[in-house]
Amino acid sequence: MYHFRSKNPANMPIKIWKNDSLYPPLLRETHGAPQRLFCLGQKPNPADKYFAIVGTRRPSIYGKQMAEEFSGAIAARGFVIVSGLAYGIDAIAHEAAINAGGRTIAVLGSGLDHITPTCNLKLAARIQSSGCILTEYEADVSPKKFTFPERNRIIAGMSIATLVIEAPERSGALITARLALDFNRDVFALPGNITQLSGLGSNKLIRDGKAFPVTGIQDIFDYLECGEASDSQKPRGLMPNEEMIYDLLKSSPLTIDQIIAETELPAPQITTLLSMLELKGVIQIKGAHAFVTR
């Protein structure tokens, strides 16, 4: 067992409970969110906007280049890059965010004394300087087959959106994408070479209408940062339930209770949808009311 924390005993992990202000707000609203997280490095900022980047452990040269470019640009725009510290796309996304002067969070499928793969231990140390390492597991918990899908729900749940870069048909990246969709988050996918197995899963996400295809970084910024909308034009990039709430709020401001009554959606889902719309700049929330920005 490698005791990663022993290298820097002054940097002790903190425990973040679900009702703590440091707990990622979007994650708190998801079904099955962990009751507590262990954080090593810099404390999370509740105002941070998290963006997940995931993909294959065996990327092509093209995949490596795109992961580096997209992660660096998104981090430079102020988003905190979230990934799983795995080989391949995950590690590249973390590195590119740091190199761009941004921040990144690595979510583990193990405790802090079992950071894997060991080749990424130096990267894990770098991440702590401006970001942090998160896990729901006690320090002595070793990685298991089931802990990685559990880890993926945290990556998807805390992030405003997920970008999939080169995912095979069966991969953890696709699990993360499916969870993001279940949580009503935006999912993007980079089109891959149709002759390579490494892009089969991400291409199917696009084919099946489950992911927005991206041909450049501006596609993501245009989709997420749609800005204010005129009365005659809806913002781009809204999911169906987000569009439904937007249409309700166009007429007049409503309280959360009124929105729940109108849509018949559960309160946690409404809270998440309103948070997403506010992050996209489509609505504002003041006091008990939410209203469309003009």
Image (cartoon, rainbow, N blue to C red):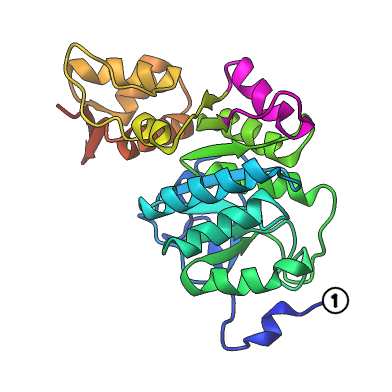
Q: Residue at x 43, y 38 (%)?
A: 217
The residue closer to the viewer here, 196 or 42, is: 196
* Residue 256 sits in quarter: top left
Magenta region includes residue 203:
yes
Residue matched to label 1: 1
Magenta region includes residue 129:
no
Q: Relative to residue 149, is residue 208 drawn left or right? A: left
As displayed, is residue 119 above or below residue 64?
below
State how many labels appear: 1
As displayed, is residue 44 above or below residue 113?
above
Q: Residue at x 68, y 80 (%)?
A: 5
* Residue 156 sits in quarter: top right
Quadrant assignment for the N terminus = bottom right
Q: Under tag 1, what secondary structure? A: loop
Badge 1, how many Cα within 10 Å: few under 14, some, many 20+?
Answer: few
Specify the amino acid type for callout 1.
Answer: Met
As displayed, is residue 11 above or below residue 167?
below
* Residue 63 sits in quarter: top right
Q: Position of residue 26 (x, y in %)?
A: 47, 44
Q: Residue at x 35, y 50 (%)?
A: 77
Task: Please report the bounds of the magenta region as a residue range.
Answer: 190-210
Q: Residue at x 35, y 54 (%)?
A: 47
Evaluate whether residue 14 shows in this view: no
Evaluate whether residue 131 shows in this view: yes
Q: Relative to residue 205, is residue 138 drawn left or right? A: right
Q: Residue furthest front?
A: 61
Q: Residue furthest left?
A: 294
Q: Position of residue 199 (x, y in %)?
A: 70, 31
